Structures are given as C-alpha cells and as structure tokens.
Amino acid sequence: MAASNSEIQERCRLYKFTKVLTLKVAQIVVQSRKGKKISQDFKPQNGVDSTPPLQWFNLSIPDEPGVNEETKRVLNGEVVDALSKVLSIEITLRTTDGDEMVLELWTVKLTTASEICSPSTIYYRMGVMLKSTLTISRITPAYKLARTQHKETYKISHRIFSGEPNFEKLGENRRNIKISELRTPIGTITIGVSYRTKMTILPEDRPKFTYGITTSGHDIMVKSDHFKDTPKKKRGYEKKELDLSKPLTNAAFVDKVKMQELQDSLCEQLPPEPPMTWLIAEREQIDKKLQNLDICKVADAEDPTAKLLADAAKTATTSASSYAASKAIDIPRANAGDQCKRIMEFPFAEGSPIADLANFYNECLQARAMTKEWKDFADTAAISTDSDTLSKQLKMFEDAVPEFDSMVASMCNSAEGGSEN
C-alpha cells in the first residue's frame, strides 16, 4: 500500500514537471519572437531583501499570462493526452499588405516508449532540455526577423494548437531540428522545430485587378482612369547638371580654413597655363603644307610663274610651322615674306556678322597678295634681257590703259553724283 502511494506521488510529480516544462517551452518560443529584449532585475524591491520567487529548472523565465492561458487551454488538464496528440506552436510573419508566411513550427510530443528513472534525474534533464530550447530559439532566421520587426513593415504572431502541424507551409528546402529527447516512466518527451529557409512571399491568394473587371469574389467595376500614373522619379544613375558658377560647398565637420589652405597649395603646385591655349596648330595642316612645298620644288625653275608659286608655298609653310594656329581659326600674321593666306574658318558662324567680317578681311589680304605678285612679276620682267618678252609686256600694259581710264572716270562721276545729292 505504501509502495503504491509513493508511485502515485512520483507519477503526479512527473505530470507536474511535464506540464511546467510544456508551459516554459511555450514561453521561451513566444517571448523570443516578440522582438523585445528581456532583462532581469535582481535588485530587491524598496531596498528590502525578499525571498526570490520560485524558479523552475533553475531558469528565470518570466511568464506572460496570455501565453499561459493559451497553453493551458490546449492541455485542458490532461498533459499526457494533449502531448500524445502533439502540442504545436506556429510562428507567422504578417506584412502590412496582408500577406502571411509561416516561419517556424515548434512541436512538443509524448510517445509511449518509457524508461524507469528517478524524479530528480528527470528534473535535471528537463532543465537541460529547456536550456537547449532557449539556445536553438536564438539561432534560427525567425529570431533575427523578430528583432527587426516594426508595425509599419511586418509583425510576427504566434498560434498554439493541438495536433500535427502542416509542414508544407514552410515551403521548399525546410530544415528540421530535433532539439532534445527525454525518456520518462510516463513516456518519451521530444522537442523539435522546423523552420523556413526560403524567405519569399508568393501572393497567390491576392485578387488580381484589371481595367473594368476584378477576379475577386466581389465583382467591383474599376474605372479605366482609377489608377493614376505615378510621376517619373529621377533615377540615381542619371547625370546631374553641374553649375560651375556656383561655389562648391564643404561637407559636414570640415575645417574651412584648412580646406582653403589645401586649395591654395594645390594651385601653387600646378604648372602655369600657357597663354592662348586655344590657338594650337593641327598636325594634319602642317603635313599638308609640307606636301605642297615638295610639289613646288619639283616645278620648273625657269618659269617665272612657277617660281612665284613655289616661293609663295614655301613662305606659307614656313609661317604655318613657325606660328601655331587653331583648327577653327587661322589668324594671319604680318610677315614680310607672306604671299599666300588661307581662308579664315569660324565654326558655327554661318550667316553671322563674324563670317562677313572674315570674308571681307580675306578679300583685303588677297588684294594685297595680288599687288605683290604683280610687283614681283614686273621686277622679274625688268631683269629679263629678252626684247620680245619686254615688248609683250609693254603691249599688255598699253592695252590695259583704256580700262584703267574708264575705271577712273566712272569713279569720278560716282563721286560727283554723290556730292550733288
């Protein structure tokens, strides 16, 4: 009779240990997914030493009344029967858009395999089981998500129920962890967890809207202009316009005096900019002038006209190599030996006053060059001893006298007419 009473007392103690173990497992899992930091205050209240509260399994785990109520409702006073049907804890992530995703499924179950052991040993091993559960609950991906949850992004909720969970909710490549297993005279207690590895939400159940028709259960007509176009935002990789007229601003926590000293020192180290850097000769133009010079050298030396052209090409090449000019603008320089000048080219200046001025200046230079050519030609003719050549030149000049007289008369008449008006 005494032996039977002791066995009944031990069995009642095992039931109580198992019930407390189940309650503590639920507290550990749910509190670790609340996203709140748990701290214990060991200071006595009001500065008076008080007896510490009862700590089951030598672990200080605070109890939340709501979690205890849910767990006790599932156990319903029958720990063995409830754990035989498997006690499950489902951890779910809910976004502000209404999407849901199951992150974890915790299970506490009791099987029929038993082993005779003393209650003190069972009590110690249950403490080890709780410590293992506490450790595993901090290394799964759901713990990191719980620490960063916010009401504006997503929240993590829980559900405690009885029965086998649906592991298909965890998606593909889920992982299973067997946390601990303990053999007792009433059966074998097993704690395990299965968690998701693919953190992707597929909105399969979300209703799809189309213009005028919606596929949800409630047929609501949507106007074609209901969804307004969002304004186009500037992308980060688009080029930004830089206004060089605005001064550059210093960044935060920058000493302006030191920055100015650094800029001054860098400016002193830079080489001075050569004057008129925009007037730089192009190599192609110089090579072309050298080719013209070679052509002039091949010309017949006895022909006075060929000599004049050769001298003009030689002078133009020498002046081009001596003085640098830009590709866009060729500014003629005053030189005694220059007889050929190039046309001035102004980019993007067609039909502008600058182009007209350039053409006028070019005509003046050409007239000056023609005068020098006639003078050189006359000097060459004077040196010649050929009487036929001299007579031809005199005849040409005599034939040109009436033209010059008529030109002078027309100029005088135009001048008199202008004065009378």
Image: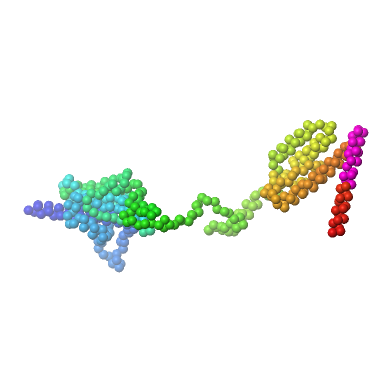
Quarter of the figure with residue 55:
bottom left
Q: Position of residue 228 (x, y in %)?
A: 44, 57
Measuring 57% from the left and 58% from the top, which residue is drawn there? 249
The residue that appears at 28% across and 67% down in the rendered structure is 48
Would you say residue 154 is visible in this rendering? no
Q: Residue furthest left?
A: 1
- The colouring scheme, among rainbow, by chain, secondary structure or one colour, is rainbow
The residue nearer to you, when weighing 300 against 421, is: 421
* Residue drawn 81% across the image and 35% down it: 306
Work out which residue is located at the far bottom of the displayed protein and give it: 46
Residue 243 image point, x, y percent: 59, 55
Q: How many marks?
A: 0
Q: Of helix, strand and loop, which mostly describes the magenta segment?
A: helix
Q: Residue at x 89, y 34 (%)?
A: 389
Q: Quadrant of the C terminus?
A: bottom right
- In the foreground, 357 or 280: 357
Q: Is residue 4 left or right of residue 329?
A: left
On screen, residue 373 versus residue 75, left or right, reads right
Residue 93 sits inside the magenta stretch:
no
The image shows residue 171 at horizontal and vertical percentages of 31, 46
Query: Is residue 310 left or right of 105 when viewed as pictured?
Result: right
402 inside magenta stretch: yes
Nearest the viewer among 248 and 375 is 375
- Compared to 56, does 345 lie above or below? above
Q: Which residues are magenta?
A: 383-405
